Amino acid sequence: MKTAPNNTEKTFPTEQLLVTKTDTKGIITYANQNFAHIVGVDEEELIGRPHNIIRHPDTPRIIFKLLWNYLHSQKEIHAYVKNLCADGSYYWVFANVTPSFEETKVIGYHSTRRNPDRNTLKSTIIPLYQTLIQAEKNGGINASEKILNDIMKEKGMEYDEFILSL
């Protein structure tokens, strides 16, 4: 699914959940019909593929670095994510990603996505992500990480706490 992004946004009903499961390397092991539908492919086409095939370049790399840091620490994380569809369109989600355990061993990850709050997207997330992406273009992921860390320090919050406060 190597599609160039375009400016067409897709949305999904508020009551709908988009769900995937991956192994510990981020390879999709399950995708519900809602997820497959918005991405624009059959569920079977997603299984065995890396989850990052839906990564939209408008979501800063630092967000995914945080996500993996949280998950590798066996903690859940919430994040606003702009994802890519097979036709190049995009959709926004408010994601909750959690480790899946078998006894005490992490065997994969479970992600449930909901419709994001549109006001939060416009007022906070989109401007923040634009700042972080610009920093990444100029100074790499370390530059965006510094900006995000400075914002969290100023707010006196961890990233997940900040996201949940919006």
Image (cartoon, grey):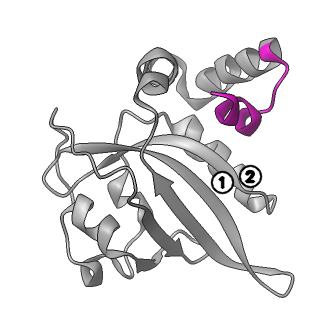
Q: Is residue 101 left or right of residue 33?
A: right
Mark 1 neighbour density, 10 Å: few (under 14) some (14–19) many (20 or more): some
Image spot of residue 159 (x, y percent): 72, 34
Image quadrant where one finds the N terminus: bottom left
Q: Residue at x 37, y 33 (%)?
A: 58
Image spot of residue 3 (x, y percent): 17, 51
Task: Point out which mark residue 157 bears.
Answer: none
Image spot of residue 7 (x, y percent): 16, 32
The residues tagged by marks 2 and 1 sit, at their Cα atoms, a distance apart of: 5 Å
Q: Residue at x 48, y 55 (%)?
A: 113
Q: Residue at x 79, y 16 (%)?
A: 155
Is residue 34 shown above or below 108? Answer: above
Q: Residue furthest front?
A: 15
Q: Nearest the camera: 156 or 120?
A: 120
Is residue 65 shown above or below 75? Answer: above
Image quadrant where one finds the C terminus: top right
- Looking at the rendered structure, the number of numbered marks drawn on it comes to 2
Task: Point out which mark residue 68 bears.
Answer: 1
Amino acid marked by disc 1: Trp
Please report contact status of discs 2 and 1: CB closer than 8 Å, yes or no: yes
Q: Circle 2 is placed at which residue position?
A: 70
Q: Residue at x 66, y 43 (%)?
A: 66
Amino acid marked by disc 2: Tyr
Q: Is residue 157 magenta?
A: yes
Rendering quarter of residue 121: top left
* Residues rendered magenta in the picture: 155-166
- Report helix, strand or loop for mark 2: helix
